[in-house]
Each structure stands twice: as C-alpha cells, then as structure tokens.
Image (cartoon, rainbow, N blue to C red):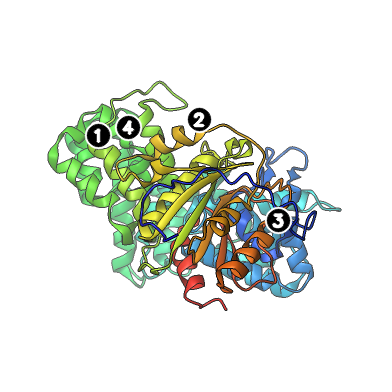
C-alpha cells in the first residue's frame, strides 16, 4: 500500500494478535544510559530538584532522581556532566533553570577535583543573570547542610568564581550596574551577601563604584571614587550617570520625567515606582528595549492598559516575538512560549486579580513563535509514521508545568509534521486508532488535544504502529513514537515489532525514534540497535537531532 502524503488513515485498528510469533514475554523496556537520563531530567524536569528551606533552618531534602549526577561523577565522568550543562544552557534547551543549576551545584560540591574545577569555571557561562547565580549559591549551601559535618560551601573556589562573575564586566560595567539594580535580591540572597562572602576585590574603579554603591549607597560611592587620579574615567562616569538615573527613577512620581529617565538610561520596570507601571506611555517607551522574557510575562499588563491597540506597539511586539535569532540568544524555551500562550489565552492569571481580553493578533503571533522556537531544518524526504500515545497515563503533567504529556506530545507531533512533508499519524493505547484530524492544517493545538482526549483510554502498547505498518504493507522509513514509555505490551515488544516490519518489508535500516515525554529511567528503544534513537520531548533541537539521525550522522 503506498504511503499517503498528509492524508488520513483509512485502516481500522490493528487488533489481530500475533499469538504464534516468537518473542512472547520478552523485554519491552530498557534502562537508558546515564547521559540520556541526565538529558531527560534537564529538558523535561523531575518531580523536585531540592526543597530549599530558609537559610537559617534545617537541612533540605534532595530528590533521588538526581543521583545520576553523583553516579556519573563517581564513574569519572564529572567533566562530561559539566559540558552537558554548558551545552544545555548556551543552546537554551531547558525550560526551567532549577535542574541545570542544581546539577552544577552538585558538581561544585563533589569530591572530584577536576569536576569541581570545571564546575567553577562554568559558573559565569551558565549563570547569565544574578537570579541564577543566587539560585546556585542557595543550592551549594543547601547541599553543604546535608553533609556531615555541615558546611556552607564558601571555600576558596566559590569565592573566586563569584568574584570573577562580577569582575568580568570590567570593560563594560554598565550591564553590571543594570544587573545589581534590576535583580537586587532573589532566593533570599542579595548582592551585598555575595560581596561579603566572596571577599570581592574590584578589578577597576568602575566595578568598585558599583560594589560600593550596593554596600554603602550612591553618596558614599561618589565620595570615594569621584576624584581625580582614577584610570578609565570614561567607564566610571558612565556607571555614575546610570546609577544616578536609577536613584532618580525610584523617587520620581512624574510620568514625563520617568519617561525621560527611561529613554536616557534604558531603564527597566524594576527601576520604576509601582504607580508608574499603570501608565501606557511608560510601557510604550520601555517596549523597544524590553527583554523577550519580560515581554512574555507582561503581555497581559500591556493588553489591559490598551497599549496593544496601538498599531505601532502591536507590530513591535509581533516583530520581537517572531525574531528567531533573538529568541535563541535570550534562551527562550518553547515550553515558556506555550505556557505564555495558554496563560494569555485564558484571560486571567493563576494568581492575582488581573483580567484581560486576549488580542487575537497576539494569540496568533505566540502560536507562530512557538513553532519557530524549534530548530528549523531542511526536510529529510523520508516517509514518517508518527505514533501518538493516547493512553490514560499521558494525562499526567510535565513536572513543574501546567502542560500535560498529552498536550506536549500533540505539540511535538505538529512540530514534526511542519518539518517533514511525508507523514502519517496514528494514535495508540491498547488498540490502534486513526487520527485524521492531525492532517487538517486548520486545526489548532487545542482542537487536537480535545480530539485525542475523547478517543477513550486503555493500556499502552507501543508496538501497535509497527505492527500496523507491517500488516498493511506500508512503506515507512522512520517510526516516531511519542510516549511516556509506559508500555504494557501483550504479545510483542516494540523493538520486536520493528524487527518484524524490517524483515517483511525488506527494510533492514527502518528506524525508530522514541520521543520521551517523561524523565523516567527507561526507554522502549533498544540501546544496542544503531537504528533506534531515544530523545527527550520539548527539546528545541529535536527536529535537527532527528534529521542528523536519519541521514546517518549518528551511525
């Protein structure tokens, strides 16, 4: 039977069991490698990273799933862990930073000297803003409290790394001045705390001015540094003007003067008085320089103020959200965009009293931005059969998010279909069900999620797509299975079903890509089969990874 391009499946469910086939009762799930487990944890998240307590209270409790980091360090692979963390951070492959920062803290607090050194050296690259630096320090101290005897973790290595984090801005200190004023404190830590504990020695007068400003205030910093004799006078004066503008904005109650200060110093919302944030004109002036993550968080606020009714402002928001390179540089993960879309479409937040009427153009733009946030690659030209797990276990939420595995799988299915032209989609639980709705380009994600929710639930048999293709004689190059890996197969394991398909269709290199929607320790892909690949769902690099695998770069 020829493979159809984006047309619905017309065969019925594959309910004919292969009772006489060999392999009954064989292994269907395989433990994944430590590196794969780490990747899943970082991209998809775990149940908890660590339960942080107030800094003065007792020791926290860590989640055992992260023991894979300790295991890799003990196996002499600690530096490999740090390299994975750096890659995840630079490429924005994690939707939340907690897991990545916790793993880095584990490396820093390990007993392996090479791992510790690599961890310290990675701090400046991974902790791009004070929020993540404060979180790292919190985790380092929390891990120390769990040890016997307890310790704070503030040894020479951490003091040096924190000092380097601040002093790295020596050639352009204004961004540091912005950081210490925008992110004054997070996670019960402040810059004052870090300056004191790291014993920081400013590398030049401009950095010293910022340190003294944080510790003693603007007047004291002016008295100490604004005198003749200091080198690099230009940078020192830039920092002084910026911090003076911040102090003026904190006290300013006049809208016009606030706007003037924003334009002159490129100030952000954290620098302004609360009442100024109820002015549409203030937001209009901040919009051109507003970071993408801040813009996503404040779409509702700008809508309630009527700012998005202005065509110029609306077009600016659209342009910024659809700037793929800017999104990558800002490390905006697809899951953040999807959650922003869901929250904005709801018209009210989960917390607070703010309500708004969602702007249809913004909804459409967020939808486009979501798909653009995945790596766009050239189609492989291969013939795909996508198997979407619609069993009851897919209703569980992805850790630390409001998105269910079912929603995430539907998203990833749509992403694959937008990348590849030759696709067919089927659903499976204990039976195989056609999913013609996925072939309708006018269907939205919400339409498809509701559609799959109403198909009935059963146990999970991940072998169904391969068995179905074999019995119907379909020409398939790659099977993509989107699942939580909870397979309750009856007669045939998924890998065995693929092998039987290969034998019957004379396609020995037919491939299987398992897209895991949960961060568990198992996969249905055989680790010793070079034509099977296990990947984590919601990885923005997923289309590129699949393409490299299909064209042979992984073999």
Q: Is residue 98 left or right of residue 445?
A: right
Question: Which callout, 4 or 3, points at the residue further toward the start of the chain?
Answer: 4
Residue in front for this viewpoint, 430 or 131: 430
At mark 4, the secondary structure is helix
Residue 388: give x, y in percent of width and height: 53, 47
Q: Look at discs 4 and 1 and give the one toward the viewer.
A: 1
Q: CA distance from mark 4 to mark 1?
A: 13 Å
The residue under the point 69% across, 68% down is 527
Question: Which callout, 2 or 4, points at the residue further toward the start of the chain?
Answer: 4
Q: CA distance from mark 4 to mark 3?
A: 48 Å
Q: Is residue 180 left or right of residue 269?
A: right
Circles 3 and 1, Cβ within 8 Å, touching? The answer is: no
The 10 Å Cα crowd at callout 4, few under 14, some 14 to 19, many 20 or more, is many
Q: Which residue is mark 2?
A: 454
Circle on res. 119:
none
Residue in front for this viewpoint, 175 or 421: 421
Residue 380's quadrant in the figure?
A: bottom left
At mark 3, the secondary structure is loop
The residue under the point 45% across, 69% down is 547
Q: Does residue 535 sit above or below 451 in this rendering?
A: below
Residue in front for this viewpoint, 275 or 47: 47
Q: Look at discs 4 and 3 and give the one toward the viewer.
A: 3
The 10 Å Cα crowd at callout 3, few under 14, some 14 to 19, many 20 or more, is many
Residue 288: give x, y in percent of width and height: 23, 49
Residue 344: give x, y in percent of width and height: 36, 33
Question: Which callout, 2 or 3, points at the residue further toward the start of the chain?
Answer: 2
Q: Does residue 490 sit above or below 115 in this rendering?
A: above
The residue under the point 56% across, 54% down is 481
Q: Look at discs 1 and 2 and give the one toward the viewer.
A: 2
Circle on res. 493:
3
Whether residue 83 is visible:
yes
Residue 46: give x, y in percent of width and height: 65, 47
């Amino acid at each position: 039977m020829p493979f159809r391009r984006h047309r619905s499946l017309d065969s019925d469910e594959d309910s004919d069991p292969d009772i006489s086939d060999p392999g009954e009762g064989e292994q269907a799930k395989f433990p994944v490698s430590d590196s794969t487990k780490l990747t899943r944890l970082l991209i998809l998240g775990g149940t908890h990273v660590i339960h942080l307590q107030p800094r003065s209270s007792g020791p926290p409790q860590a989640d055992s799933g992260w023991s894979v980091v300790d295991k890799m360090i003990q196996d002499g692979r600690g530096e490999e862990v740090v390299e994975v963390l750096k890659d995840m951070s630079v490429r924005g492959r994690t939707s939340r930073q907690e897991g990545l920062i916790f793993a880095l803290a584990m490396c820093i607090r390990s007993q392996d000297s090479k791992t510790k050194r690599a961890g310290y050296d990675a701090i400046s690259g991974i902790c791009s803003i004070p929020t993540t630096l404060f979180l790292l320090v919190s985790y380092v101290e929390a891990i120390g409290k769990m040890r016997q005897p307890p310790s704070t973790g503030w040894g020479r290595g951490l003091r040096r790394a924190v000092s380097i984090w601040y002093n790295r801005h020596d050639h352009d200190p204004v961004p540091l001045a912005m950081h210490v004023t925008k992110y004054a404190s997070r996670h019960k830590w402040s810059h004052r705390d870090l300056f004191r504990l790291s014993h920081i020695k400013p590398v030049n007068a401009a950095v010293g001015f910022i340190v003294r400003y944080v510790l003693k205030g603007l007047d004291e910093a002016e008295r100490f540094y604004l005198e003749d004799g200091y080198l690099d006078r230009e940078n020192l004066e830039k920092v002084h003007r910026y911090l003076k503008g911040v102090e003026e904005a904190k006290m300013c109650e006049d809208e016009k003067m606030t706007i003037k200060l924003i334009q002159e110093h490129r100030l952000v919302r954290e620098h302004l008085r609360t009442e100024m944030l109820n002015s549409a004109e203030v937001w209009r002036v901040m919009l051109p320089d507003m970071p993408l993550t801040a813009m996503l968080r404040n779409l509702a606020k700008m809508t309630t103020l009527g700012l998005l009714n202005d065509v110029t402002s609306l077009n600016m928001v659209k342009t910024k959200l659809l700037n793929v390179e800017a999104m990558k540089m800002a490390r905006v993960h697809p899951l953040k965009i999807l959650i922003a879309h869901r929250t904005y479409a709801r018209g009210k937040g989960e917390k607070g009293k703010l309500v708004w009427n969602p702007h249809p153009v913004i909804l459409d733009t967020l939808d486009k931005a979501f798909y653009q946030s995945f790596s766009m690659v050239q189609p492989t030209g291969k013939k795909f059969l996508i198997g979407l797990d619609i069993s009851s276990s897919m209703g569980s939420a992805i850790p630390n998010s409001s998105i269910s595995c079912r929603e995430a799988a539907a998203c990833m299915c749509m992403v694959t279909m937008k990348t590849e032209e030759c696709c067919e989609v089927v659903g499976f639980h204990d039976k195989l069900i056609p999913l013609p709705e996925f072939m309708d380009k006018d269907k939205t994600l919400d339409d498809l999620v509701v559609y799959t929710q109403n198909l009935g639930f059963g146990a999970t048999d991940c072998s169904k797509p391969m068995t179905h293709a074999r019995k119907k004689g379909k020409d398939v190059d790659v099977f993509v299975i989107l699942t939580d890996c909870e397979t309750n197969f009856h007669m045939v394991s998924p890998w065995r079903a693929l092998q039987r398909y290969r034998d019957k269709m004379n396609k020995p290199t037919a491939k299987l890509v398992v897209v895991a929607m949960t961060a568990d320790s198992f996969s249905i892909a055989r680790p010793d089969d070079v034509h099977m690949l296990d990947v984590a769902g919601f990885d923005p690099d997923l289309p590129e990874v699949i393409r490299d695998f299909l064209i042979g770069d992984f073999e």
